[in-house]
Amino acid sequence: MSITSASTNGVGFRGASATEIADSVRRQIERGELAPAAALPPVRTLADELGVNRNTVVAAYRLLTQAGLVEARGRAGTRVAERTPVAQDGFAQNTVLRDLAAGNPDPRLIPDLRPALGRIAGRPVLYGEPIIDRDLAAWGETWMREALSDERALKLTITGGASDAIERLLAQTLTRDDAVALEDPCFLASLNTVRLGGYRPVAVPVDAEGMTVDGLRAALDAGARAVLLTPRAQNPTGASLSAERAAALRELLAEHPYVMVIEDDHFSLLSEQPFHSIIGADHRRWALVRSVSKFLGPDMCLAIVASDPGTAGRLAERLNPGATWVSHLLQRLALEQLTDADAVAAVTAAAAHYADRNRIAAAAFTAAGVPVIAGDGLSLWVPLPVPARAASEQLMRRGWLARPGDEFVLENELAARHLRLTVHDLSDADLERLATDLAAAIPAAAATLKAG
């Protein structure tokens, strides 16, 4: 059969099969002949011009979507994917503003590594040894079993932080364009991991008790093959699962035992809230991820992962020593800190500090006329009567850099009327000034929007 071609909208596509058509479009995207956001021809139009069945064009567009090259936008048609910068947590570069957007722990509250560094030197670790240090594995198993409170079969492995673990867990479970149930609003790192992996995020609303049951049921009905959830200190809202909500989610997930459930307990040792898992004892595919970055420092890129044995085996294959080595020196350093009395005391003091400063800040905002309820975590989720981006612009004029809630949104437009503010390192005087400025920013933003 000869390869036909089409010149719809002045762009020449060729092919008689889905693969040939997809390759033709791919080449033009790679050469810059199709710009980001450029519209592809409607399925019927392209099928008629190429003389192929419409299902062939549908299959071609599906291949391109799975490769992340195009996006289906409903009534707006299929368009070339745009490569837009994704929001990241961390310090703002080159700013003179007081940074409330970073989401960082207080460096003064991170345990001093120097005493432990001198104690971890020992025999060198060679290729072929266990991925997880034996002593850390023993400590970690106790830590994880205390959380899960049952005798289920589990195995541990180690990754280069929580995001590394989540990326690998999703990769060994899903294929491109598979659906992942995500909290909405969603932690930036999780949202970026899912989007950059080529998976399809499905929004599940979060309320004061965590991920909602009805929202998760709808996501599962929509074909979600994985669930990514924060049991405590959900970022950005600060919500933690209640015992009742966790039980209801476990009951729902019992009907879907092969859906991968990933719990990211990132705030673990700093949380004031009890841990409640949504992973039932009989669930077949699951992982509990606990990183150390919030309490031992972001540069300690290490997470302990407990999971069912099958998941652990596949995860270990993706952590083959010599390919993606997780330093045993780093593992030993983490263990030293986690078992040292002074370091543990420092973590406990840090937990109390974060909670106390958030409560004081919430009280100051509320007294200034901006009601806030302090949740768990490093930041406050501040509801506003105006769009957060407009309010953040007004705060910038007053010397503050805030993070608007629309950066965390999947579908929940209400989140765009929130600010996430990291305020635990502010003095009482600075908190009072911030509260005053925030109260003034709201009517100023409303007036600007009205005038515009």
Image: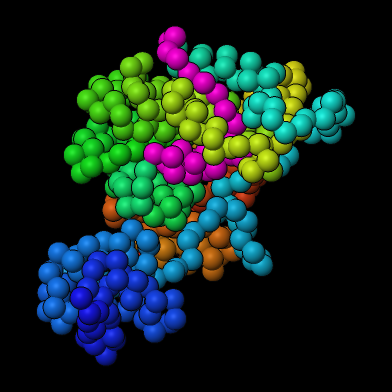
- Image-based side of 155 in relation to 204, left or right: right
Image spot of residue 227 (x, y percent):
35, 37
**For the point 27% across and 72% down, which residue is it?**
21
Residue 81, image quadrant = bottom left
Which residue occupies the foreground of this view, 131 or 442? 131
State the extent of the magenta-drawn residues as a range. Answer: 150-173
User: Which residue is at 42% across, 33% downward?
Assistant: 262
216 relative to 149 in the view: left or right? left
Q: Quadrant of the C terminus?
A: bottom left
Which picture quadrant has residue 292? top right
- Above or below — where is 363 with respect to 78? above
Residue in the picture at 14% in, 64% down: 55
From the top left corner, tell me how far across and down residue 246 is, in percent.
Answer: 33, 24
Q: Position of residue 373 (x, y in %)?
A: 41, 38
Q: Is residue 402 above or below residue 190?
A: below
Point 37% across, 27% down: residue: 285
Q: Which color mode does the image show?
A: rainbow
Q: Quick one: 50 or 97, which is closer to the camera?
A: 50
Q: Estimate the x, y position of residue 423 in percent, counting from the top left.
A: 57, 46
Figure check: 9 above or below 16: below
Please identify the residue farthest to the right as the structure is shown: 118
Q: Is residue 89 magenta?
A: no
Pick out the residue farthest to the top.
Answer: 151
